[in-house]
Amino acid sequence: SSGPLSGRVALVTGASSGIGAATALALARSGAAVALVARRQDRLEDLARTIREDGGQAAVIAADLAQPEQARGAVMRAVAELGGLDILVNNAGLMLLGPVAGADPTDWHRMMDLNVLALMHLTQAALGPMKQRQRGHIVNISSVSGRGASPTSAGYSATKWAVGGFSEGLRQEVRLDRIRVTVIEPGVVATELTDHITHQDTKTSYESRIRTMTPLEAEDIAAAVVYATTQPERVNVNEILIRPLDQG
Ligand code: NDP
């Protein structure tokens, strides 16, 4: 299809809902062939159908990214099915908020495995195919919680801070291979993210706080990904921080 990303292949993790689904659709509408990665295959098939009806190209890759071999395998499958890889959007994530003292440590492991280690494995696996194309773009979805922290965000902020540190070192290494690195830091976005919070008091108070504001929509973050990935090759958009106007 036509568009600024025509001829490019993008892999989007967490494409079954929220920011990832909106981003995959937006990249496809910009002309990219997209590999849709998450666990819920039915959701991915629905999105793939929408993209194809739109005239775009999509591949469905069901994977549990908390398993390193499945994360790395998802990259290999995308390359095999779509013929290469130009753009990796590391979006899949969990926000299991809760106070440090009362947290279930299992939550920390789940967040570290997905928000940090899956992102690192996916990135490493993507570098070979990107070097082969002599260009590439890695977009990491962090959070305002990657720049600041508040009570109940310590564990989540630790994972998003890790994303920031990894991305900055990576950026300096791979620019020599014409690979760009962008970190996007959204404030509150209306998605399924809060559904998974296990600490019930925190879940209740966070959800009631969101009801007092007009949050961002997933499409607002997708637009930032499209902005970064459609700039001329000389432009390396390093970081984008976006809050809803209502968020202080
Ligand atoms: P959603 O819960 O809607 O989306 C999360 C996605 O991650 C889903 O597609 C889910 O798919 C996928 N996922 C979860 N676990 C796994 C796994 N083990 N393997 C593969 N995929 C997995 O939330 P958002 O869209 O809001 O979140 C996307 C990113 O945005 C996250 O990194 C989040 O931290 C970040 N973010 C969100 C903000 C917000 O306010 N919503 C604010 C700042 C950052 P499935 O369950 O099918 O596997």
Image (cartoon, rainbow, N blue to C red):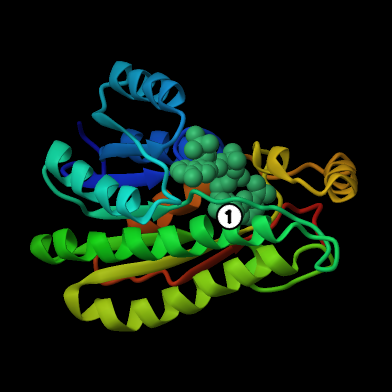
Task: Give the percent coordinates (x, y) of residue 219.
Answer: 54, 39
| In the foreground, 195 or 170 | 195
Q: In which quadrant of the rendered image does the C terminus lie?
A: bottom right
Q: Residue at x 88, y 47 (%)?
A: 209
Q: What element carries label 1?
A: helix
Give the quadrant of residue 117: bottom left
Relative to 231, residue 43 above or below: above
* Distance from mark 1 CB to nearest ligand 1 atom below 8 Å: no
* Amino acid type at image mark 1: Arg
Number of marks drawn = 1
Query: For the residue carrying disc 1, how many other residues have a C-alpha within 10 Å: few (<14), some (14-19), or many (20+)?
Result: some
On the rendered structure, is 228 left or right of 92? left
Residue at (26% x, 72% y) in the render: 234
Q: Answer with the quarter of the image where residue 195 lies.
A: top right
Q: Which of 104 and 170 is in front in this view?
A: 104
Q: Name the residue under label 1.
A: 110
Q: Which residue is drawn at 76% across and 64% down?
A: 153
Estimate the x, y position of residue 220 in percent, counting from the top left. 57, 45
Name the image quarter holding residue 185.
Answer: bottom right
Q: In this view, does 74 lie to the left or right of 89?
A: left
Q: Taking 56 as reference, is 153 above or below it?
A: below
Does residue 118 lie above or below 168 as drawn? above
Q: Residue at x 79, y 60 (%)?
A: 103
The answer, for residue 44, to whether it is visible in the render is yes
The answer to whether residue 145 is above or below residue 77 is below
Place of residue 188 in the rendered image (x, y in percent of width and height, measured from the top left): 71, 50
Judged left or right of residue 16, residue 195 is: right
Q: Can residue 220 be seen in this view?
A: no
Name the quarter showing ligand 1: top right
| Residue 67 placement (x, y as % from top left) | 40, 51
Quadrant in the picture for the N terminus: top left
